[in-house]
Amino acid sequence: MYGVNLSSGLIGGKFAGAFNIDRKIGKGSRTSGRYEGTNYYLSTAFLPSANQSLYFVFHGAPQVHRYSWSNYAGYFKKFGFTANPAPFVTSDVANHWDVKYGSSQYFKSITDGSRELTDNDFVNLSHNFYRKPQAELHWTMNLKDNSTLKATAFYTIGRGGGSSITGNGSVYAYKRGVGINGMSLDTITTNKYGPDGYINSLGVADKVYLKTAVQRISYSFHNQTGLLASYEKKINNNLNITGGAEFRYWKANHPGHFTNLFNKASSTTSYAGDTSTTPGVAKAISFSRKV
């Protein structure tokens, strides 16, 4: 983590400003559990008179996170507690995949960082990202009769989402059974991971994991604005009376779309849909979608 903190102090008895920014990067305790984030905060103050103050604040924290997935105890017993079965491949595998399909009509890179999170070691095919900058204007006026007027206006924009892999081939599976004295006994039936519990082979990534897989992103977009106002009256040292009002307007959209079919022309996906005439009875629906 590193950052910068700047402050002007009070200038001319009326103006002040401060700006803070810091950058955080970490890998977490699991393989390829990297996260990145930036925090920023800007504040300016204006004191037009002895009993009034006006503050403008702008802040936000854009960030991206890789996934750390859970699994059954047998997976961690075999590969260790830092292993991570989330959807990622080594950078070497991803580079070789790009070279193999780079001239194909349906090729979309998995190393350019536009649909995935990359570093020198791994390429995460699923990750999440979010940012929510917010601007605020605060006004306070102290009246002579031990009362105070306050008002705050704000506007914020939320932009984020998460990518995911569906339809992928199985690279690790087991079956549950019963052992001695009724103890559960798990038997590994499929293991195409490398020795550290993740995909480190182009053949496994290409011919098994990504052969039928598709990547999609689901977004969260929202805008919100609001106005808050209050009046506070101090009756005595033990009693304050406060009254106020609040107005907010919020609009959201949650679209999603396929972003990579991994060198396939189209993908057919099934989902549950209530298409019958009997309420609550769902049927499987299929559709074909190009990227």
Image (cartoon, helix red, strand yellow):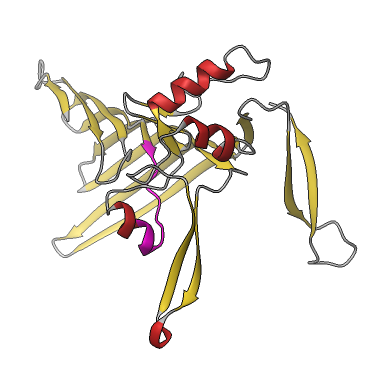
Identity of the residue furthest to the right in this view: 277
Residue shown at the point (43%, 39%) measured from the top left: 199
Quarter assignment of residue 106: top right
What residue range appears in magenta? 65-75
Residue shown at the point (64%, 25%) measured from the top left: 263
Viewer-side residue, 76 vs 228:
76
Residue 75 seen: yes
Q: Is residue 72 magenta?
A: yes
Q: Is residue 171 magenta?
A: no
Viewer-side residue, 11 vs 121:
121
Viewer-side residue, 24 vs 32:
32
Quarter assignment of residue 36: top left
Q: Name the quarter where the N terminus is drawn.
A: top left
Whether residue 100 sits left or right of residue 124 in the image: it is right
Residue 56 location (% of width, % of height):
29, 27
Residue 194 location (% of width, % of height):
38, 42
Whether residue 231 sits left or right of residue 192 in the image: it is left
Viewer-side residue, 95 vs 10:
95
Above or below, 281 against 107 in this view is below
Q: Name the quarter where the C terminus is drawn.
A: top right
Identity of the residue furthest to the bottom in this view: 181
